[in-house]
Image: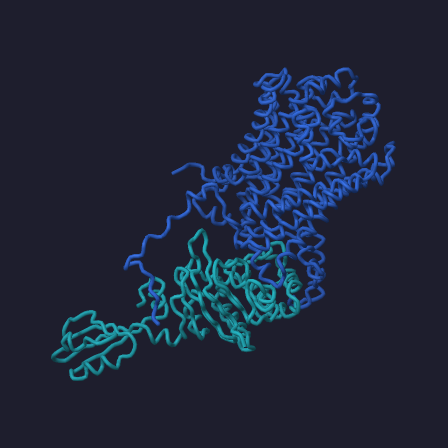
Amino acid sequence: MRALPVFRKTLRDQRFTVAGIGFALFLLAWFHIAIYPSYHDSFSQLELGMFEGLAGEGGDITSPAGFLTNEYYSWAPLLVVVLVVIGATGTTLGEESAGTVDLLLAQPVRRWRVVAEKSAAIALGALIAMLCGWVGFLVGKATGDFAIGPVRLLEGVLSTLPLALVYLAVALLASTVLPSRTLAASAAIGLVVADYFLNMVGALVSAVDPWRDLSPFYWSNAGHYLAAGFDWVRAGALVALAGVLFALAMVAFERRDLTSGGREWTAPWRRRKDESAEEADAGFAGEVALRGGGRHPFPIFAKTLRDQRFSMVAMGFVLFAIAILIAAIFPTYRKELEGIELPSIYQGMMGEASDISSPEGFFGVEFFWWVPILLLVLAAIHGTGAIAAEESAGSLDLLLAQPVKRWRVLTEKVAAIVVGIAVAAIGGWLGFLAIGPFVDIDLSPWRTLAATVSMLPLVYLFLGIALLAAAFFPSRSLAAATVIGLIVAGWFLNSLGASVDVLDPWRVATPFHWYDGGGVLLNGIDAVRSGAMLAIAVALFGAALVAFERRDVSSTGREWTLRRRARRPAPPAAETPGTRLSPGPR
Amino acid sequence: MPAAIQTFDLTKAYDGRPALDHLSLTVERGEVFGFLGPNGAGKSTTIRLLLDLIRPTEGRAEILGFDTRHQSHEVRARTAYLPGDLRLYGNLRGIETVELFCRLRPGADPAYGIELARELDLDLSKHANALSKGTRQKLGVVVALLGRPDVLLLDEPTSGLDPLMQHAVWEILRREAGRGATVFFSSHVMSEVEQTCERVGILREGRLVAVEPIAALKGRSLRHVEVSFAGGVPSPADVALPGVRELRRQPPTLEFEVAGELDALLRALSPYHILDLRTEQPTLDELLMTYYTGEAA
């Protein structure tokens, strides 16, 4: 008998996500080691006093430790923490909404053990993803020159582990106390984002600095670990905090009822509405008000929009906050960066707006260069899930048994995703609009709107790829992992190709090459490029439609395994008189 | 007028293994047809093929004269479906579910859904994921009947319901049949099949092994006969008759298994002094078991 079955199953369930994040961290780490020499050459001559806070205790941002802290570690811990939060909110509420928790806890296994095994698997998954980043550093070191040794790099990488444990426990507590997984994940991710920004803003703004003591991100600052080695005191304090939160989560989970099929939760404002409707009609639901998707002429569109409202609005809010932050720090940056000659890699990334002290160049590289990645991940997740999510939930059968054509189902779902992504993108523009009156930025809001809109053809193109991948790959996770891999690889190919001659000719093959947010800020939308990307997106959507029209629909999600051939049952033995099928009485 | 359901060598294979093997079947309009078979026999596969959710490897099917593959939209506009493993949108309330499916089915009236819900004592204000299995099934029945369809394809429609609710659902389905709808349903509840069906089809390992009116199926069953005699008993040669098999000879009692009518056996026994004669007919359950296990001859 093999030990820790829940641990092993959880590890297996998250294998694609861990592999995807690990791959991204590997490339990110390698990329940073690769660009460090030219980065150092460009920035070492400058007075960059205000940025010292971003380097933490890693020294100045041009030193190897300061550079990694300011660049790699400004994103890597966030990715790992989001991975952990999503996994942790699924440990209890995920099983409850899937309806499997009853069967699991009907076995002679204690509740705390189930949660502990699941949590351990999530923590191990996070550690594996972090170590992929370390491998990326080692590969970068092997192919170039970097002054920090492998052990110290490992200590830096491990600085994220206590942080991940804290947020694992936070998410676990949220999912045992709050009534819905979406709510728990939103609360935990909201806390992560608030903590992240508190730490980052505190590094730049002295008035906020004392508050950083409350930030787990601050106490897990990689610069400190890279400069002084693994800090057992800081790590121990964070692990102790995680332990307390974990214990609270355990107590809450031990005490509460379990629901099979997920807990019912209604937002207070809707609850009030329902109560007033009930008061109006105390009898049976005879006059229950028709609402939501019911009145909409495109009910599948309306329902899909409603289903994804949390993720799209949350993304819009994140972009809003990022835009405000970036715009707020711009005036200070402009003074520091005036006249700087950027390394070729940055110039390649910046496209036509190559002056980083200009608003076009600054926003081009600090916002419009990487923010599309967030929208692309959203497109990959929703695009691969458009049909597959409903198929694995088992509700697609009933939907397609209605007199509605398959093309209409897919079109309405995709239209909702297209609108949702546009709404999320507009969140960023609203951020620029909101901060505009308070900051001196010489940039028309129409230009920022144009640059925001110019992200969409790129995102829709990858949405098309995601739809097609979901149609062809037998599993949604595999399709999503492939599309996210393509996004990450394409982004790095385009970015590295700007300074690596051998990669340069291949840049045209990535859609990122045809997107230039900074250029749009400078010259307005390039209708030809955007139109071409939209045309490709439509063609990919058309191909996905054809594939969906032709294929069988599974009632419980498509089965797929790497060992499919090996597991296929042997053909039936030759019929013998004893096994011969009876034709039955005639 | 075309039949309600007609399949022509309908076949579905996965990895070369047939899940449904050359099914040829006709269900007339207005008929209540039971589709029986053990798990994995191909019942759900048949229903999902009829709805164009999966595509046949060979053969074809028609519903009300419409090809299920090439005119599936017309088919689905006239057909109701209740899946065996019913999954509803957990984040929608009952009333929202009813609204959504009414929007997807032109002509469907939410008020009728509310009326059905009242009949089934179903509270439409709760989210689907907060409903018990039986209550979810009631909501599934309501959704299926929204458009007053001509053909009802129901995969174990009373699964998870208590006897009272099973009765209520069957009342509604009988009413649907009464207005001319065809009911094609799979089931494991033999008493329900016996009471509601006119004909049954029996599937085993993807093949149709019998299509019979219920009465004929029962009439065809093997009867167990036990006869006690006063004095001599008939010799084996006396009772060597077609359809009669001697099971046990323990004078003064003989036991037989008889297929079909008893007339020939009684005539053969009439010269002897019979003290007692007992016959037992297997239940429909036992009879179907013989089909399921391949013992039916």
**Residue, x 73% and y 36% (percent of image)?**
A514
Q: Is residue B236 visible?
A: yes
| Outermost residue, front side | A505
Nearer to us in this view, B184 or A83 = B184
Expressed as whole percent of the image width and height from the top left, the position of residue A158 reads: 58, 25
Q: In the displayed structure, would residue A62 be above or below residue A452?
A: above
Lateral position of residue A560 relative to residue A329, left or right: left
Quadrant for the N terminus of chain A, please.
top left
Expressed as whole percent of the image width and height from the top left, the position of residue A508 reads: 69, 34
Expressed as whole percent of the image width and height from the top left, the position of residue B133 reads: 52, 59
Question: Which quadrant of the view contains residue A337?
Answer: top right
Quadrant for the C terminus of chain A, please.
bottom left
Lateral position of residue B110 relative to residue A522, left or right: left
| Outermost residue, left side | B231
Q: Which chain is blue?
A: A
Lateral position of residue A228 relative to residue A359, left or right: left
**Residue, x 57% and y 32% (percent of image)?**
A126
Q: Which chain is cyan?
A: B
Q: In the displayed structure, would residue B266 be above or below residue A358?
A: below
Expressed as whole percent of the image width and height from the top left, the position of residue A23 reads: 59, 32
Q: In the displayed structure, would residue A362 be above or below residue A310?
A: above
Q: In the displayed structure, would residue A517 be above or below residue B35?
A: above
